[in-house]
Image (cartoon, helix red, strand yellow):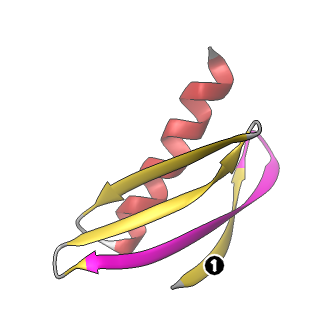
């Protein structure tokens, strides 16, 4: 498990990333007071999907 900080709308958010299986990485963190979790085939893309989901949530 690794923690990383990413910027969403110029604000830092701490995201935890871990490998669930050989081909599944999970990124999770809190955004706007709610838990947000995404999955993808690599660590980098799981984090990218988390940021995209957070931006989408912040837009709506």
Rendered location of residue 31, percent (x, y): 70, 43
- Per the rendered image, the range of residues in magenta is 8-20
Q: Main secondary structure of the magenta part?
A: strand
Q: Is residue 29 left or right of residue 14?
A: left
Q: Is residue 12 in the magenta section?
A: yes
Rendered location of residue 40, percent (x, y): 28, 59
Compared with 1, 45 (above or below) is: above
Residue 29 quadrant = bottom right
Is residue 5 or residue 31 the one in the foreground?
Answer: 31
> What residue is shown at x 32% (from left), y 70% (from top)?
25
Q: Residue lying furthest left in this view?
A: 23
Point out the image quarter for the C terminus: top right
Compared with 26, 39 (above or below) is: above
> What residue is shown at x 17% (from left), y 82% (from top)?
22
Is residue 31 or residue 49 the one in the foreground?
Answer: 31
Number of numbered discs: 1
Question: Mark 1 sits on what residue?
Answer: 3
Rendered location of residue 7, percent (x, y): 72, 54
- Dot 1 falls on a residue whose secondary structure is strand
How many residues crowd around disc 1 within 10 Å: few (fewer than 14), some, or many (20 or more)?
A: few
Rendered location of residue 45, percent (x, y): 36, 61
> What residue is shown at x 43% (from left), y 78% (from top)?
18
């Amino acid at each position: 498990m690794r923690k990383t900080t990413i910027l969403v709308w110029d604000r830092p958010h701490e995201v935890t990333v871990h490998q669930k299986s050989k081909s599944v990485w999970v990124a999770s963190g809190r955004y706007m007071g709610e838990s947000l979790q995404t999955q993808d085939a690599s660590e980098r893309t799981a984090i990218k999907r988390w940021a995209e989901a957070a931006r989408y949530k912040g837009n709506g």
